[in-house]
Image: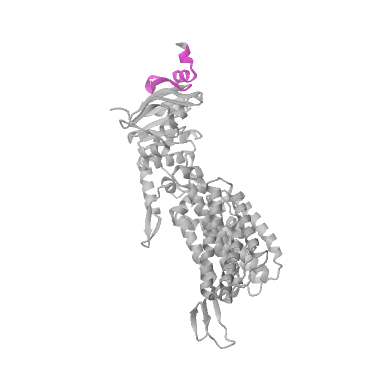
Amino acid sequence: MTRKSGLAGFLGQRWAVLFLLLEVIVFSVIGEGFFSLNGVQIVLFYGTSLFLLATAETFVIVTGGIDLSVGFIMGFSAVVSAKLVAAMAVGGMDPLPAILIALVATLLIGLLPGLLSGFLVGWLKVTPFLATFATGGIVYGVSLLLTGGGETKGVPDLANVIGNSYFMYWAPGHGLSFFTRPEVVRGTRVLEIIPSMLVVTAVVVIAAAWVLNRTRFGRHAYAIGGNEDAAVRAGINIRRHYMVIYTASALFSTLAGLIYMLEYITGKPDAGTSYLLDSIVGVVIGGASLYGGAGTVWGTILGCLILSVLETGLRMAGVPTFDKFIAVGLILILAVLIDQFFPELIHKED
Amino acid sequence: MGYLLEVRNIVKRFGGLTAVNNVSMGVSAGEVVGLLGDNGAGKSTLIKVISGVYRAEEGTIRFKDREVEIASPMDALGMGIETIYQDLALAENLNTPANIFLGREKMKKSLGVLNVLDHDYMHEESRKVLEKLDILIPSLRNKIKALSGGQRQAVAISRSIYWDAKFLIMDEPTAALGVAEQKKVLDLVNRLKDHGIGIIVISHQMHDVFSVADRLVIMRRGEKVAELVTRQTNPDEVVSFIVGAETVRK
């Protein structure tokens, strides 16, 4: 897995790249305003949660497992962080410190489900499917208990300001400004460039890709997924590795939940449940093998873009979003068939 | 000069079954000894005692003229006794350098702080060790999956050699290989001799054993029934020892 082979592996997914281009072309023709700065940003905005959950899924799938808890952990994180912020705000704390404390605390709490899954898989040899399903169930139950089944209210508006801010703004006469909206005369058009939460997501995704591709930890994850026995005999501590992998997955999912809370200033137990299917499909389209040992974060992001463009494109074209699920199912079948019958398109030797 | 590796009076029991009964044998540096016997003769148990998987109830192991304790596979590896099992223990989804360095990756500093894999170093070192052993792998960047059975065997062997193996135990090295591939692996075993490595080869293929082994140790029902110099025997005689006809005749 050298730098070159990473690139070649990426280009080896030609079909996915072509499919994405095709999608963009089709939606640009049939959907008004799709091919615009705004359209792109909507695609990426929908993508942020998916990118994070699918990156989490990639870590686990590379080691030959699967994580069914990512969506539940995202909801759990949204609920916990919203509860914490609301409680502190009611207690009279200023919004900013309350939000910051809640974010950090939730990130720490979010490690727990990952540690549980990692312990079940690494130490007790529970199949990842069952281990993460159990963890997800527990986490979902706790979220429901915390909220009584509803939403969490009382998050200060500042959260919304942070969650929906942009990395850059451009207004005539003001030039570029970062993170804060320039004061302009009413009616002046302000160009909003890149949502801040997308920047956060991008940083995390780039770091995750780097870890998987360039570090010993990443290398060992591939080795475990390829041949667990060989990894053990090479002296790799696979228990600890599973622990870290599942904890990292939980951390990415928790981050997705925090972003959700900031964007929607609420916490819902099922905030992330609809992303589970998409996150796994994204990883599979991205060229990972569910048997482990293959897959890259960049491939996964490509797979997610296909899904995200589909979602946004259908919506902008006025197609009911229910159809999206059917389309995702069909794309998954396509990806699996290509993997089955034309493996050289994906697992191209470099 | 004495043996590089010597076992004396090894006894290994599993419950009431004596899998290895009072077996002694030795291998010199640069020598290949073929270990032969039918299924259940105790060959595998004996090599697992040497590689640290099992502990013998009785007997001693001497390595480099010293008595040693081999309590675990890690002990054996630490001394430079490597076992290459039939399944080779390679991660097929990774390439050759990644496998040679698996678990012992060379790192370098990136931007002065971050520890990253040193791909260039590992690639270069892999190339050197393969060259030293005259092994031809089309491209080191190919995943193991894309290599033939013989090339995989060669990668597993070069990994051992790179990490300074002094003694190799090879379990059925030519099983599941085509004829041309078998020859390449056997040639490689012969080259390893020139590097002063002691080797035990377990094989069912009489032809293999006769083409690489200097001596033959034959086991039957847990006991050593014969020790022969390859050049002074023939396959018929060996087979009769394996099945027990020779002892019956006596």
Relative height, residue B67 to residue A294 (above, below): above
- Which residue sits at x=60%, y=72%? A265
In front of the other: A119 or B91:
A119
In front of the other: B130 or A231:
A231
Apparent side of residue B240 relative to residue A286 in the rendered image (left or right) = left
Furthest residue in direction front, as rendered? A91
Camera sees residue B2:
yes
Residue B38 is a magenta residue: no
Camera sees residue A301:
no
Q: Position of residue A246 (x, y in %)?
A: 53, 54
The N terminus of chain B: image quadrant: top left
- Asked where in the image residue A312 lies, by quadrant, the reply is bottom right
Query: In this figure, which colouring scheme has been used for the structure?
Result: one colour
Residue B239 is a magenta residue: yes
- Which residue sits at x=39%, y=21%? B227
The stretch of residues the image draws in magenta is B221-248
Apparent side of residue B65 relative to residue A173 in the rendered image (left or right) = left
In front of the other: B221 or A10:
B221
Q: How many marks?
A: 0
Furthest residue in direction left, as rendered? B1
Furthest residue in direction bottom, as rendered? A185
Q: Position of residue A191 (x, y in %)?
A: 55, 80
Q: Position of residue B30 (x, y in %)?
A: 33, 31
Relative height, residue A337 to residue B68 (above, below): below
- Asked where in the image residue B77 lies, by quadrant, the reply is top left
The C terminus of chain B: image quadrant: top left
Q: Position of residue A199 (x, y in %)?
A: 51, 69
Furthest residue in direction top, as rendered? B250
